[in-house]
Amino acid sequence: MSDENTKEPSPEENVEASDPAAAPAAAAAPEDASPAQQAQGAPVAEGAPAATASEPAADEGPASGEAARFDKLKKAEEILRASSPETAREMDENAFEKVVHINRCSKVVKGGRRFSFSALVVSGDRGGRVGFGFGKAQEVSECIKKSSEASKKQMMSVNITHNTIPHPVVGEHGGARVLLFPASPGTGLIAGGGVRAVVEAAGIKDVLAKSMGSNNPANVVKATIKALGELRSKEQIYSLRGKRLPDRKAI
């Protein structure tokens, strides 16, 4: 036979021919096995992932990490809601705060101008309590925070009858004068500026108001607070006079 028809044996065939015990081990190690398993000749189960200890798991990715983080945040929010008392949640829901006025003051010094801010804030629980606060700071957010805390410390009670005031009243402070009149249901808040902020924070829904004199926001707010402080209910007036309310007769 010629040299072209002769076929030289491969190195694997030479190994099998020389060592017959190596043939079963080579046949048992499939192609998808890891190099260490192929060298040892250990069998690998079908469908098992060929991953070493240094290689990361295939299912760990950015999508799974974001999902786990979202679940943790959601659980934390549920825990906080469950631990917070119901009274605190109700007060936060009904709380009312409004910035009536922010003033900027500049001071000229050797190096230039220095600015400072002051804020007037009205706060209330919309249930008959209202207060105002005034704060100063170098930053707007800080002065609003100070005035908000001061307004909560100076809360006062207001007599409200059927979502309106029991009788007409006039409040004065400095050059500001505020008139408040009762209104029928459905009228709304006929007021503006600082007067509207105060009556809305107190929980009054129907009122007629008129501001006269100075339009300084601080004086208007203080005059409105003073007017609300002078309100008296029917029971209080009768008790001061030493009288008793007549009992209503059935129709």
Image: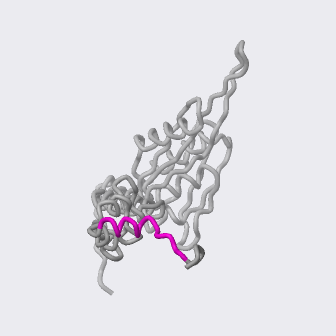
The magenta-colored residue range is 6-19
**Which quarter shows the C terminus?**
bottom left
Direction from residue 213 to residue 227 in the image, left or right: left
Q: Residue furthest top?
A: 110
The reply to whether residue 234 is in sight is: no
Q: Is residue 214 magenta?
A: no
Residue drawn at x 44%, y 56% is 95
Q: Residue furthest bottom?
A: 251
Quadrant in which residue 58 is drawn: bottom left
Quadrant in which residue 209 is drawn: bottom right
Residue drawn at x 50%, y 40% is 145
Residue drawn at x 48%, y 51% is 228
At which x and y percent is residue 202? 47, 56
At which x and y percent is residue 50? 37, 65
At which x and y percent is residue 116? 63, 29
At which x and y percent is residue 223? 55, 44
- Is 135 drawn above or below residue 45 in the view shown? above
Q: Nearer the viewer, residue 20 or 200?
A: 20
- Is 39 drawn above or below residue 113 in the view shown? below
- Is 97 drawn above or below residue 204 in the view shown? above
Q: Nearer the viewer, residue 43 or 94?
A: 43
Direction from residue 247 to residue 7 in the image, left or right: right
Q: Is residue 10 magenta?
A: yes
